[in-house]
Amino acid sequence: MGNAGKKRLRIVFVVGLVAVGAGLFLALGPPRLLAKSETPDFCASCHVMEAEYEAWFHHGAHKRIRCVDCHLPGDSMARHYVWKSIDGMKDVVVFHSGRVPDDIRISAHGKAVVQANCIRCHESAVEMIDQKRFCWDCHRRVMHRHVGVPFTR
């Protein structure tokens, strides 16, 4: 086996070791860490999300559900936790690097996830509706920033 083959084998071994370690940490990690990180209080613990949390808490149309129920994929547990990891690490890096924008906007991927979750939860109500438009184009009160704003045309 040449140097390139040995190097590739080492990389595969290290990646496998990290994956096993991450799996064990998630399975056996700090008590209730995973459950705690899915609560709205955890999402609001970052001071840049205070306005969104307050809007959801006091006036939100969906205040009986958690942030992750809308903002993370809900179609499979695997996709949910993969995107929870990706989005969570992105948020940690952005927050701790001091690069948090003043106006936080949802990404294109985030919009697709929220739209899919709206359709999944309200499937029987929307089966006859054109689902190409975003739900919040009409239902503005579900958006954090427009909570309490009456719908006008």
Image (cartoon, helix red, strand yellow):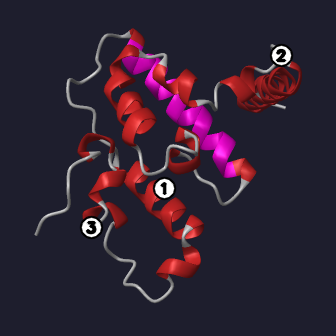
SS of the residue under disc 3: loop
Q: Is residue 74 left or right of residue 152?
A: right
Q: Are marks 3 and 1 in contact (CB under 8 Å)?
A: no
- The residue nearer to you, when weighing 93 against 119, is 119
Q: Is residue 95 left or right of residue 123?
A: left
Q: Is residue 91 found inside the magenta-colored segment of the image? A: yes
At label 1, the amino acid type is Val
Q: Are marks 2 and 3 in contact (CB under 8 Å)?
A: no
Which residue is at a point 41% across and 10% down the rendered structure image? 96
For the question of whether residue 80 can be seen, the reply is yes
Which residue is at a point 87% across and 27% down the rendered structure image? 27
The N terminus: image quadrant: top right
At label 2, the amino acid type is Pro
Q: Is residue 82 left or right of residue 7?
A: left
Residue wearing tag 1 = 113
Q: Is residue 62 left or right of residue 84?
A: left
Q: Position of residue 2 (x, y in %)?
A: 78, 29
Query: Residue 31 — which label?
Result: 2
Query: Residue 14 — which label?
Result: none
Which residue is at a point 49% across and 16% down the rendered structure image? 45
Q: CA distance from mark 3 to mark 1?
A: 18 Å
Residue wearing tag 3 = 138
SS of the residue under disc 1: helix
The C terminus: image quadrant: bottom left
Q: Residue furthest bottom?
A: 128
Q: Quadrant of residue 40?
A: top right
Q: What are the residue bounds of the magenta stretch?
A: 79-95
The vertical placement of 109 against 145, above or below, is: below
Mark 2 or 3: the one toward you: 3
Q: Residue furthest left?
A: 153
